[in-house]
Image (tube, rainbow, N blue to C red):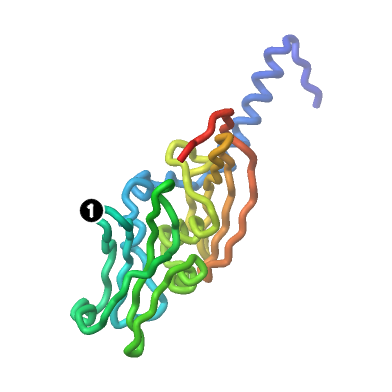
């Protein structure tokens, strides 16, 4: 069957309809990621479920040099009385380095078999999280891999639960010049991570200066 278009506008309308339908199918079944995860990190941290039941562990957000609120314990799990039986120290480094040009970071302390252990880098954090139990852990694994989400764009801020993990549409951002790329991600329950760059969806000649 042959289609004859009397006016070019008819062809453009059809092509637009086909393009829009393809775009819609691409994100079918995906849900927007809540902006709360971006504005309140505690929403993520509260959902961490290590594979092992430690006697006690805590997640700490540290902002060195602040006159108040330098240390924030975002989550405690286990027997908190054990904390008083050990001399816990603040490590001078951690993961998720932020607050530039100042300096803040996160770390985890856990007590296992009578010994104190510190999680101070992203490789150790991934090992500590272990099996991916929920969306929040999947987002943390994505953050370890340099990705985050854009709550305003489904192409860069959505997720879908799969039989063995999660599919996510996330964002990779650049400061100078400002650029945002849509990244399709697959994470299975074991934490195996796959990503595909879907191209830029925002560009600017401006720069973010710390």
Above or below residue 67? Residue 19 is above
Q: Nearer the viewer, residue 117 or 199?
A: 117
Above or below residue 165? Residue 20 is above
- Quarter of the image with the N terminus is top right
- Quarter of the image with the C terminus is top left
Q: Quadrant of residue 45?
A: bottom left
Residue drawn at x 39%, y 49% as measured from the top left: 102
Residue drawn at x 36%, y 50% as measured from the top left: 37
Above or below residue 173? Residue 2 is above
Q: Nearer the viewer, residue 17 or 59?
A: 59
Above or below residue 100? Residue 4 is above
Q: Residue furthest right?
A: 2
- How crowded pointer 1 is (Cα within 10 Å; few <14, some 14-19, many 20+) is rated as few
Q: Is residue 90 left or right of 167 when viewed as pictured?
A: left
**Helix, strand or loop status at disc 1:** loop
Residue 206, horizontal then vertical, whole percent: 54, 29
Q: Nearer the viewer, residue 165 or 200?
A: 200
Residue drawn at x 33%, y 60% as measured from the top left: 61
Residue 59, horizontal then vertical, whole percent: 33, 66
Q: Is residue 57 left or right of 9 when viewed as pictured?
A: left
Q: Nearer the viewer, residue 39 or 19?
A: 39
Q: Is residue 6 left or right of 181 when viewed as pictured?
A: right
Residue drawn at x 81%, y 23% as measured from the top left: 2
Q: How many marks?
A: 1
Residue 93, horizontal then vertical, whole percent: 42, 65
Q: Residue furthest top?
A: 7
Residue annotated with mark 1: 67
Residue 43, horizontal then vertical, whole percent: 32, 55
């Amino acid at each position: 069957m042959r289609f004859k278009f009397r006016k070019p506008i008819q062809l453009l309308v059809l092509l637009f309809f086909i393009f829009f339908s393809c775009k819609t199918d691409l994100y079918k079944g995906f849900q927007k990621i809540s902006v709360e995860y971006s504005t309140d990190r505690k929403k993520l941290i509260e959902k961490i479920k290590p594979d092992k039941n430690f006697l006690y562990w805590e997640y700490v957000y540290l902002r060195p040099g602040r006159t108040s609120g330098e240390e924030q314990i975002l989550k405690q799990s286990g027997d908190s009385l054990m904390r008083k039986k050990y001399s816990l120290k603040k490590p001078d480094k951690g993961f998720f380095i932020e607050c530039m040009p100042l300096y803040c970071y996160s770390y985890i302390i856990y007590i296992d078999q009578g010994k104190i252990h510190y999680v101070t880098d992203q490789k150790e954090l991934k090992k500590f999280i272990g099996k991916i139990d929920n969306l929040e852990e999947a987002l943390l694994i994505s953050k370890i891999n340099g990705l985050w989400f854009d709550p305003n764009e489904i192409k860069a801020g959505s997720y879908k639960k799969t039989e063995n993990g999660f599919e996510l549409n996330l964002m990779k951002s650049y400061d100078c010049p400002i650029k945002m790329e849509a990244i399709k991600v697959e994470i299975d329950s074991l934490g195996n991570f796959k990503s595909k760059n879907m191209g830029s969806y925002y560009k600017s000649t401006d720069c973010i200066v710390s």
